[in-house]
Image: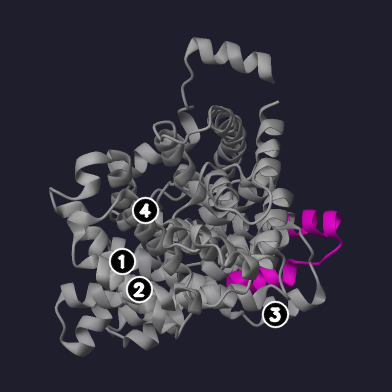
Amino acid sequence: MLKEDVRHMFDEAAGWSLSSLKLIDTIQRLGLNYHFEDEIKGSLDTIMTTKDKSDVCHQENDMYTRALRFRLLRQHGYEVSQDVFKNFKEEMMMRSSDLIAWTVRDVEGMLRLYEALFYAFEGEEILDEAQKFTTTHLKEQLIKANSIISHNNPNLSKEVSHALELPLHWRVPRAEARWFIDTYKTMQDMDPSLLEFARLDFNMVQATYQEDLKYVSRWWRELGLPEALGFARDRLVENFIWAVGFNFEPRFRNFRRQLTKVNSLVTTIDDIYDVYGSLDELKLFTDGVQRWDINTMADLPDYMKICFLALYDTTNEMAYHILRKHGVDSLPYLRKAWVDLCKAYMVEANWYNNGYTPTLEEYMNNAWISISGPTAQTHAYFLLGDEITNKGLECLKNGPDLMRSSSMIFRLADDLGTSTDELERGDVPKSIQCYMHHTGSSERIAREHIKNLINDNWKKMNMDQAAASCKFPRSFINTTQNIAQTAQWIYQYGDGYGVPDSETKDWIMSIVVEPIPFFQREIGNLCLTL
C-alpha cells in the first residue's frame, strides 16, 4: 500500500513540473530511489524532452527549479549545458548586496544551486564562478544573526550547514538517508506516506545488513587471520561499512559480503607491508602473489604463509562462483588487481626504507593504486554481475579513467584524514608531506591544495561517468562514484577507519544496528497498510 501511494504521487506530478522534480529529489534523499527507477527515468525523460516548452514559464524558470533540474538530469546521465545558469549571474550579484532582504525562497534557490554545481565538468567556468559565489553567500547567511534563515527557518539553516559541511553529491547515500529521514519529518511539505515508507524501508534494509554482518563475521572468525597476525588491524565492521557504502541496495547482498572479504584482506596485507614485514620478506610475498602458485608458500615466513593462503583460497573461490553464475573467467583480472596492489605497496616500502620523499606527481601515480581502489573496483565489476561484456573487460584491463579519478579521490581523502597517524605508525610520506617537502609550503597550504585536487578529480569523475556509459553498466558506474563518496565520509573528521572517532561510530550504529523508532500507534497503522 505505501509503495503504491508513492507511485500515485508520480502520476499526480506527471509532466514538466517543479512537483515532479521535488518528488524525485525527496525519494532519492530518503533512500527509496531503488524502488522507483522506472518512474524516475520516465519523469526525467519527460522533463528533458519538454524543457524548451517550459522555459517560457517564469514559475518554472527560477533559480530553485533550474538548479534542481540541472542536478537531477546530470546525476542520471542526461546532457545538460552549463549555459542554463548564465542568465542568473547578474541576478545573483544584485541579490547579494542585501542579504537581509533575501526571502526563504532565495536561500533555498541558492542552496539548490550550490548542490547542483558539484556536478560540474572540467572547464565549466560559469559553474566554477557560481560555486565560489554560492559558498560565500550561504556561509554569510549562516553567520549573520539577522538573516532570514537565522530568524525564521531552523530547518533551512540545518540544511545549509549540512550542505556546506559536505555537498550532497559527495555524501554516502545510506548515511544521507538516515540523516534526511529525521530532517524530513519536521518539514512543512512532509508527506506522511513517504515518510513512513522511508522509515520502514530503512529498518528492513538494515535487517539485511545485520544478516550480512553475521555471515562475514563467521567467515572472518573461521579464516583465523586476527589470531594468527596479531599486529594487523582487526576492522571487520569498518570493512563491512565500506561495502555498504559501495552499494546499499538489498539485492546486492552477495556483493557486500564478498567486498567485505576483499576489504579485510587488503587491510591485513597493507599492515604486512607497512608495519611488520622486512624488505626481503615483502619481495618474497610480492613475487608469490605475482606467480599465484601455491608452491611459493615454501619460501615465505610462517606469518606470510597464512595470509597468502587466505588470499589465494578466497580469490579462487570467488572466481569459481563468478564463473559458475556468469560464465566468465574473472581470475586473470582478480589476480592482476592483487598483483598491482602488492607492487604498489612494494614501491612505497622501498621509498620508506630508503628515506625517499617522492614528488606529489610521482606519489599519486602509485598511490591511486596502493589505496586499493582499483582492487575493489575490479572485484565489484564481476560481483555486480550486470552486463559483463568483452568491451567492458577490455576497458577494465587498461584501468579506465573512471577508476582512476575515483581512486584519486579515495587516496586524497584518506591522506587528509590519516597522514599524521600513519606517519607515526611508520608509513611513507603522504600527499600532504610530499607537497610540503618539494614546495616548502606550510601544512595549511598543502591541505588546501589537496582539497582543490579532490574537487578537480570530482569534475573529472563527473565527465568520466558520462564517457563510461557506453562501456560499463550503470550499477558499476554508480559503485565507482560510491567508493569516492564513502572515502569522503569515512575520513571527513579524521581516520574514521583506522582509528574510528565517536561520530563515525555513531553513524555505523545508526546504519547497521539501531533501527529508526516507531511509536506504538504508528506500528499499528503500518500493519494495516502493508
Q: Earlier in the sequence, mark 4 or mark 2?
A: 4
What is the chief secondary structure element of the magenta stretch? helix
Disc 3 and disc 2 in contact, CB within 8 angstroms: no
Magenta stretch, residue numbers: 318-340
Q: Which mark is residue 108?
A: 4
Disc 1 and disc 2 in contact, CB within 8 angstroms: yes
Label 4 SS: helix
Please name the residue shown 49% across and 46% down the image: 241
Q: Amino acid at mark 1?
A: Thr
Kindly tell me whether residue 77 is visible in this rendering: no
Q: Amino acid at mark 4?
A: Glu
For label 2, the crowd category at 10 Å Cα-Cα, with few meaning under 14, some 14 to 19 and many 20 or more, is many
Dot in front, 4 or 1: 4
Q: How is the image coloured?
A: one colour
Task: Please state the horizontal and vertical placement of residue 477, each as a whole percent of the image.
Answer: 63, 66
Q: Determine the CA span between mark 3 and mark 4.
A: 41 Å
Q: Which mark is residue 134?
A: 1
Q: Which mark is residue 395?
A: 3
Residue in the foreground of this view, choosing between 213 and 97: 97
Q: Amino acid at mark 2?
A: Ala
Quadrant holding the N terminus: top right
Dot in front, 3 or 4: 4
